[in-house]
Image (spheres, grey):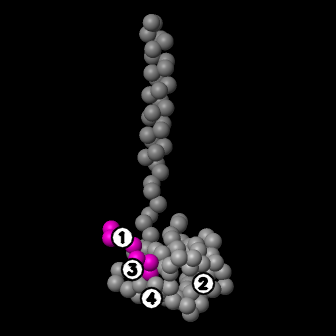
Amino acid sequence: MPLKMIALPSALVGAFVAYSTAWAAGEAPPPSPAPAMMRLVGQYGSGSDLLEIYESGGHLFADGDGFHQAELVPATPGAFKAADKTLIFAKGVGEASSVSLDGAPLPAAISAPK
């Protein structure tokens, strides 16, 4: 096989690998959310009333118990508004121990130890 036939595909593969590596290295992962925000992330309530609070792009969202990807908007420290409802998180050790949804308490769901 002539050297030109081997060199050309090798050069293309090499250029592709070099470009891919440089492109991947230029993309940094998103920054970690603040610990104060992450302590609110979790599941609250049980059964059909299960409310899930999650973080995406530095914002908190709620799913379940009448919410669907509803962004939580800070109202006061520990309180948020979403879809005309008020969520107030009770302070716990490390993680929030419960959330009050328009006055109705939802305890943190019990999860397996990490």
Q: Which is nearer the N-term, disc 4 or disc 2?
A: 2
Residue 112 is tagged as 1
Taking depth in this image into account, of 79 and 31 the one nearest to the observer is 79
Residue for badge 3: 95
Marks 4 and 2 sit apart, C-alpha to C-alpha, by: 15 Å
Instruction: Single out the mark in the foreground, 4 or 1.
Output: 1
Residue 96 visible (yes or no) = yes
| Span of residues in magenta | 108-114
The residues bearing labels 1 and 3 have C-alpha atoms spaced at a distance of 14 Å
Q: Residue at x 41, y 84 (%)?
A: 97
Q: Secondary structure at mark 4?
A: strand
- 20 relative to 89, above or below: above
Whole-angstrom CA distance, mark 1 to mark 2, is 29 Å
- Residue at 39 percent across and 80 percent down: it is 95
Q: Position of residue 30 (x, y in %)?
A: 47, 60
Identified by mark 2, the residue type is: Lys
Q: Amino acid at mark 3?
A: Glu
Q: Check contact, mark 3 vs mark 4: CB within 8 A.
A: no
| Marks 4 and 1, the one that precedes in the sequence | 4
Instruction: Identify residue for label 4.
Output: 90
Residue 107, horizontal then vertical, whole percent: 46, 84
Give percent across and percent down for residue 6.
45, 14
**Pointer 2: what residue?**
81
